[in-house]
Image: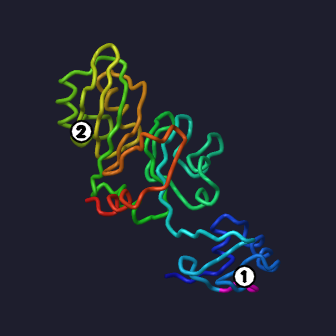
């Protein structure tokens, strides 16, 4: 386990700036293993030691894994000068730590993982891993078996040809509903794939990333931590 300065641990938990948490220590409000801390620079192992701040136990977690049902109108970023970001939806102590794993377009809803585990992020986003992403979409226009066949071959776009994609037709008519599974996740990829056939995506929702599924109990904008089972599946996904 890693030893860190007490003031750094407290600041990373969102209890204030380094200067502000030093004041908490000087006021005698921080207790470590039943002993009042007097030095904000003392080294602690946050995962193992009992730290209490102003009578409240500190629930320290080095790694945070958050499953968010991203709503429309929110950008997949940690900061933005114009729009609300996905981290703005989270509690401060999580928001200051995590980053989104990949991105969803501003008008796209659904599953988004946020974490401070860079190794897991890299594993899920690496093209070599070929982690598949599944989407539900409504299409303005009729989707047919011809499109299923074309998606399976890979769709030629202006700047690249996509990897083979699985397209499932749920309903077909003036408005069609589909599920599509892709490997890459390039910018506007699903929309561009349908646009190549003069079809317009009117609604897009990511429902799965690798073994991780969108929780149907989460409304847009709601979130929860990953379960241990979900985290194990992600870490062991090949």
Return the residue nearer the eye: 151 or 99.
Answer: 99
Residue extending furthest toward the right? 27
Residue closest to the eye, 24 or 203: 24
**Coloring applied to the structure:** rainbow
Q: In x, y percent, where is residue 121?
A: 41, 59
Give neighbour class at mark 1: few <14, some 14-19, many 20+ (Cα, 10 Å): many
Task: Name the secondary structure under disc 2.
Answer: loop
Residue at (27% x, 25% y) in the render:
170
Span colored in magenta? 36-42
At 30% across and 33% down in the image, what residue appears? Answer: 179
On screen, residue 183 above or below 11: above
* Left/right of residue 91 with respect to residue 55 in the rendered view: left
The residue sitting at 71% across, 80% down in the picture is 31
Q: Quadrant of residue 124?
A: bottom left
Q: Is residue 74 depicted above or below 174 in this figure?
A: below
- Mark 2 or 1: the one toward you: 1
User: Which of pointers 2 and 1 lies earlier in the amino acid sequence?
Assistant: 1
Q: Which mark is residue 165?
A: 2
* Quadrant into which the C terminus falls: bottom left
């Amino acid at each position: 386990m890693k030893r860190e300065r007490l003031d750094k641990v407290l600041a990373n938990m969102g209890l204030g700036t380094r200067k502000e948490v030093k004041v908490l220590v000087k006021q005698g409000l921080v207790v470590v293993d039943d002993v009042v801390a007097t030095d904000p620079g003392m080294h602690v192992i946050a995962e193992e030691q009992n730290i209490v701040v102003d009578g409240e136990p500190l629930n320290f977690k080095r790694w945070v894994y958050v499953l968010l049902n991203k709503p429309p109108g929110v950008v997949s970023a940690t900061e933005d000068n114009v729009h609300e970001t996905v981290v703005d939806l989270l509690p401060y102590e999580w928001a200051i730590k995590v980053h989104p794993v990949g991105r969803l377009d501003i008008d796209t809803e659904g599953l988004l993982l946020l974490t401070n585990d860079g190794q897991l992020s890299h594993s899920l986003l690496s093209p070599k891993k070929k982690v598949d992403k599944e989407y539900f979409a409504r299409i303005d226009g009729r989707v047919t078996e011809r499109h299923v066949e074309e998606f399976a071959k890979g769709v030629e776009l202006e700047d690249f040809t996509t990897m083979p994609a699985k397209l499932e037709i749920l309903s077909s008519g003036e408005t069609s509903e589909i599920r599509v599974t892709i490997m890459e996740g390039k910018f506007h990829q699903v929309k561009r794939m349908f646009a190549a056939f003069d079809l317009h995506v009117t609604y897009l929702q990511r429902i799965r990333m690798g073994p991780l599924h969108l929780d149907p109990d989460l409304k847009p904008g709601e979130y929860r931590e990953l379960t241990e089972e979900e985290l194990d599946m992600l870490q062991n996904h090949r």
